[in-house]
Image (tube, rainbow, N blue to C red):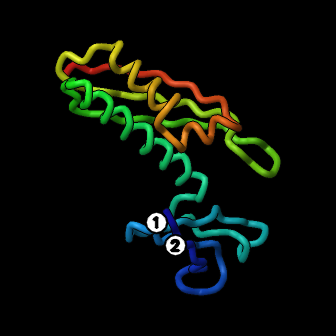
Amino acid sequence: MECTVSWTGALGTRSGMGFVAETGSGHTIVMDGAPDAAKPENGGQNLAPRPMETVLAGTGGCTAYDVVLILKRGRHNVQGCSVKLTSERAEVDPKVFTKIHMHFTVSGKGLPATAVDRAIAMSHEKYCSASIMLAKSAEITTSFDLVDA
């Protein structure tokens, strides 16, 4: 796996904190920093997600992917899955994630709560590289709602 991240500055200038990531699979992700009122040249323009937000989003994508796949492999009629991640970060550098809560909403026909609970646990214990990696610095908790669709 590879990725190239390039500084774009602000609107093509060499000021600001905009970046574009080009992934090995041929996709791009735009990122930007938060505005800095004290030193505008050091801040972003709030035009895209922050890099740490993309880490959180990627972790959510990783675990939701696992949950859907595990349920499908178990021949469950899963029809929807979303996960809302809330986090806390350290107050001093490096501002690592210290707590992450993932709340899943899973919908389907006759989905057993035990199967959903097991899929979430399997993702966090065995399959989701991102959440397993982040668990080295953050306490990760999960919950879920089950919607019969």
Residue 43 placed where, x, y %? 69, 69
Residue 32 placed where, x, y %? 57, 66
**Amino acid under label 2?**
Val
Secondary structure of residue under mark 1: strand
Question: Dividing the image into 4 quarters, which one contains the C terminus?
Answer: top left
**Sequence-earlier tag: 1 or 2:** 2
- In this view of the protein, which residue sits in the foreground, 122 or 80? 122
- In this view of the protein, which residue sits in the foreground, 98 or 114? 114
Picture quadrant of residue 73: top left
Left of 132 or right of it: where is 89?
right
**Amino acid under label 1?**
Ile
Left of 34 or right of it: where is 38?
right
Residue located 79% across and 43% down the image: 91
Residue located 64% across and 72% down the image: 17
Left of 19 or right of it: where is 92?
right
Number of the label disc, if any, that sits on residue 90:
none
Would you say the residues marked 1 and 2 are in contact, meaning their CB atoms lie under 8 Å apart?
A: yes
Crowd rating for badge 2 (residues with CA inside 10 Å; few <14, some 14–19, many 20+): some
Crowd rating for badge 1 (residues with CA inside 10 Å; few <14, some 14–19, many 20+): some
Alpha carbon distance from label 1 to label 2: 6 Å
Picture quadrant of residue 114: top left
Residue located 46% across and 36% down the image: 127
Residue 95 placed where, x, y %? 74, 48
Query: In the rendered view, would you say 41 is above or below 111?
Result: below
Secondary structure of residue under mark 2: strand
Number of the label disc, if any, that sits on residue 29:
1
Number of the label disc, if any, that sits on residue 20:
2
Query: In the rendered view, would you say 63 is above or below 16?
Result: above
Residue located 33% across and 14% down the image: 113
Residue 78 placed where, x, y %? 23, 28
